Amino acid sequence: MMFVVMVVAANAADYYLIGGFNSWKLKDSSAKFTDQGDGTYVLDYAGTLTSGFKINDGTWTNGNANFGGSATLVLGETYSLTTGSSSGNITMSENVANPHLVFNPTAKTLVVTGQSQEATVKYGIHGDIFGVTAWSTEDFTEKEGKWVMENKTIVAGIFGIKVMDAATGSQTGWIASAGADAVVLDTPMTCKADGTNWSIDGGTFTFTFDPEAMTLTVSGQSVAPEYPEHLYVVGNVNNGDFAANNTVALAKGASEGTYEGKVTFTGALGTDNSYFGLSTATGATAADWNGLGTRYGAPVADAVPSEEPSAIVKGDKSWKVANGTVTVKVSLVDMTISVIGGSEPDPEVPAALYIIGNVNGTAWSTEIPVEMTREGNKFTAEAVVDDAGEGFGYFSFCTVAGADWDTVNSGDRFGPAADDTSLAVDSPAEMILYKEGVNASACKSWKVAASDEGHKYMFTADFDAMTVKVDMLSGIASVDSENASEAVYYNLQGVRVDNPANGVFVRVAGGKATKVVK
């Protein structure tokens, strides 16, 4: 369909080189590609490019714009890229000084040229086991082909092995467990690139990494884990904003490493939902985030905890809950949290919603989509579906109307999971959010049988169920008075049927539509 091409053209992305060479800095202006207007993007980088890099749109949220690889890139040769949120880092057998890069996002190719330099590597342990709040790195020492860190006292946490360019110190790779995440003492553990991070109790240990055998051996003595004296809920409590000094203390539970307490969540900026995390201290001021000590949070931002134990990780990603008073139970032994007595947050309903597509003669106009009417958490609108070819019209929903597609995609959009998904009459189908700033421009379209004989549809977007439904409406004004009693039949896909038999149909007569079985 022609409009799809227009959307892509109107939403050409910016692309950036990102990797260990620039400490994985997002939207690095010195590493931004220049659009050549012919489908390719070019970057002349002033510096040294080392292994371990990707190309993205300046975010980590759009897997379709996260370009990586699996094989080793050879200078001067066309390299095939992969996409996806889990695509691997691009590796090279040598470093490149002042590289020239030609990137084609459509063909998913990259060519790198420049002055090659010998690449040597070193290794270090990177994790939260060195007694500081943030993750940090400490280097191994090379000894007879192995890399060793001797008699190191650590705290309980997680870690992996950072591969670094010896000359620049930039990260070129990541090595971790090829199997289970828990460290097994005095046993060579198999490693692999981009494996599972290890977890380890506190104690004093010697770490030995063998890059040839790809094994890590940890020997030493663990100590019993120490649990914090205090644990706080930090977030939308006490009728206040999410601030470092706005906390509620949890009491210690019946067993070591457990905490619980009543917490009243009062809403983010007057909404019905609240956000929170956990910390071992309270900040001195609203902005004193470094004063929170160790922070614990959700594995994924805005996860909704339930009465069943949910996973906790070290970090600052927040949970999302409905406002009200609940009991929060935490176990740092099992690293779980339970929220008892609350309810699911209300759905996020846009302030406005439009039908955009082959409707009411608008022909996918961004300026005049069909505005819908809100009642509760549902939006409805009556509209005629225009024939875009082969008897079908296409549509999706948007929350912003404007002069062009960039304006439309500056808001959220809603569509099906797969493009050109067929909708049957009076049959709800799943509606997917395409988020502004993430993937709005990739919104898919539904297709529905074009209106015939003057009939039109009632469109319903239900945000409680996250579904879309179309119902056939009769067009009284368009029915000839002398034929008003003559019945017209349609199947559940909205296609007119002259001789209905053996099925369920929609009968339109006298200005009314009813479902009948033949």
Image (tube, rainbow, N blue to C red):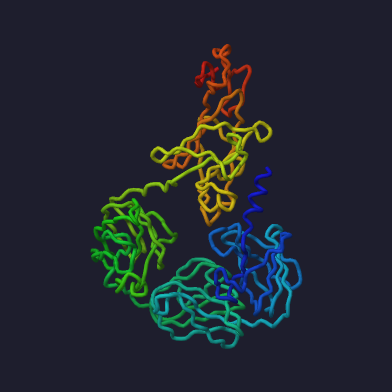
Image location of residue 66, percent across then percent down: 60, 62
Q: Judge from the rendering whether residue 320 lies leftward or rightward of residue 515; answer left or right.
A: left
Q: Where is residue 280 in the image (x, y as percent from the top left)?
A: 31, 71
Give the quadrant of the N terminus.
top right
Is residue 285 placed above or below 468 in the rendered structure?
Answer: below
All told, the count of numbered labels is 0
Q: Nearer the viewer, residue 494 or 516?
A: 494
Q: Where is residue 159 in the image (x, y as percent from the top left)?
A: 47, 73
Give the residue drawn at x 43%, y 61%.
Answer: 299
Residue 390 in the figure: left or right of residue 291: right
Q: Position of residue 167 (x, y in %)?
A: 61, 85
Residue 164 in sight from this viewpoint = yes
Q: Is residue 42 above or below residue 464?
A: below
Instruction: Please tell me which residue is depicted at 57% across the width and 48% down the height of the picture.
Output: 443
Quadrant in the rendering for residue 39: bottom right
Direction from residue 278 to residue 490 in the image, left or right: right
Please give left or right for residue 123 compared with residue 93 in the image: left
Whether 59 is drawn above or below 144: the answer is above
In the picture, which quadrant includes the C terminus? top right
Front residue of 26/158: it is: 26
